Amino acid sequence: MRAVKNPIAALNTVNAIQDKIGKLADFPQLGAPLSATYDDIDVGDYRVLVCSNHLAFYRFEGDKVYIDHIISGRRNYIAILFGELPQDAE
C-alpha cells in the first residue's frame, strides 16, 4: 500500500466521493448507463457516476444501490472491470 503524501487532499477526495455517492439513495439513475458509451461489449447493468477525478461504477435494483468499484478516471477502467477485450472491441 502506498503512503499518503497529502492526507488532507486524500480526505477531501474521499468526502467528495461520499457526497456524490450519497445522492444515489434518492436518485439511483443519477449516473449514466455504461452501455451508452460501450454498446459493442456487454457491460451489464453498470452505471457510472463521475466523482471529481474518480468514477464510481454501480448497479441498482429497486431501492438498493450496489457500489461495485471506484476507480481513478486516469486508469483503464474497462480493462479493470472486464479484463482484456478483443482488439476490435477497444
Image (spheres, rainbow, N blue to C red):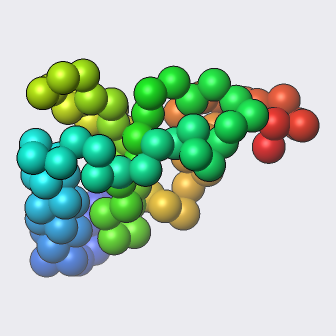
Give the camera-side residue of 48 and 36. 36
Q: Position of residue 57 (x, y in %)?
A: 38, 41
Q: Judge whether residue 71 can be spotted in this image.
A: no
Q: Is residue 40 visible?
A: yes
Quadrant of residue 83 within the rendered picture = top right
Q: Going 88% across and 37% down the picture, which residue do you hit?
A: 87
Q: Quadrant of residue 6?
A: bottom left
In the image, 88 versus 54, the foreground residue is 88
Q: Is residue 51 left or right of residue 41?
A: left
Q: Position of residue 52 (x, y in %)?
A: 33, 70
Which quadrant would residue 38 be assigned to in this image?
top right
Q: How many marks?
A: 0
On the rendered image, what quadrant is the C terminus found in?
top right
Left or right of 29, for residue 44: right
Question: Is 25 placed left or right of 76 in the picture?
Answer: left
Q: Residue at x 27, y 29 (%)?
A: 60
User: In the rendered view, would you say 66 is above or below 74?
Assistant: above
**Residue closer to the observer: 83 or 9:** 83
Residue drawn 19% across the image and 60% down it: 20
Q: Percent position (x, y) of residue 76? A: 61, 50
